[in-house]
Image (spheres, helix red, strand yellow):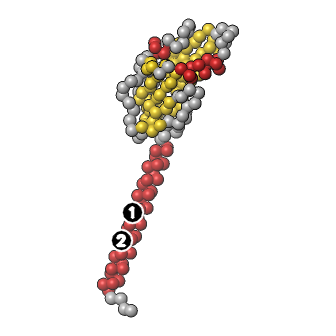
Amino acid sequence: MHLNSNHLQAIGTLAAAIAALIALFVAWDQGRVMRQEIRASVWPALQLDGFSSQRDADIVQGLNIQNAGVGPARIDSITILYQGALVADLEAVSEGFPGYTGRSATSVTGRIIGAGDTVEVFSFVNPRTRADDAVEMMYDLASNYRVEVCYCSVLDECWIARTTGSITPKPESVDACPDSGVSNL
């Protein structure tokens, strides 16, 4: 069988087209991998930790937010519910801590929390009585309070971190943080 120059040209063109398609696929795949690497390198992972501890003659209770991820987290909203009802502000939160003798709070909405950083959102100091047990008080807090924090990465990818009783579930990916029904903290 004898191939003429038109057949050789067609085979060469087909080979070039196949090589171009392979190169295009490789470039697309490398771009996809790079985007995943960039996302992973700036991924924040907020952990919400309610606490109750005995300090000297007092019981200190409150909420910490820690960024256990590798990138900064911008907190867009925080929602606190007490027995299912929205808590509007720190004054309303304090009603759940009767008899407190001291409190502290940090505004977190709009704040950037760096990787590895922890912020104490609020704490209340109560005089300890003989019957008080910090662990039991923590379980009581966990059963009455629910906290949701919506936060975003520098790439505007957003998540909602939640507390659910004594278990903190994995943050849920969302398209954007909600604007309404947010506590003023």
Asked if residue 163 lies left or right of residue 150, the reply is right
Q: Residues within 10 Å of mark 2 (few under 14, many from 20)?
A: few
- Nearer to us in this view, 4 or 112: 4
> In the drawing, what numbered circle is on residue 24?
1
Q: Which mark is residue 145?
A: none
Q: Is residue 32 visible?
A: yes
Residue found farthest to the right: 130
Identify the residue shown where x is 62% and y is 14%.
59
- Residue 115, visible in the rendered structure: no
Q: Is residue 46 above or below residue 40?
A: above
Q: Which residue is mark 2?
A: 17
Q: Quadrant of the N terminus?
A: bottom left
Q: Residues within 10 Å of mark 1 (few under 14, many from 20)?
A: few
| Towards the viewer: 47 or 113 | 47
Q: Residue furthest bottom?
A: 1
**Which amino acid type is shown beneath numbered disc 2?**
Ala
x, y (%) of residue 139?
Answer: 61, 21
Q: Nearer the viewer, residue 93 or 139?
A: 139
The kind of secondary structure element at disc 1 is helix
Q: Quadrant of the C terminus?
A: top left
Report which quarter residue 3 is drawn in: bottom left
Residue 126 in the image: above or below residue 17: above
| Mark before the other along the chain sequence, 1 or 2 | 2
Image coords of residue 183 (percent x, y)? 42, 21
Distance from disc 1 to disc 2, alpha carbons, whole Å, reads 10 Å
At label 1, the amino acid type is Leu
Residue at (39, 71) in percent of width and height = 18
* Figure label count: 2
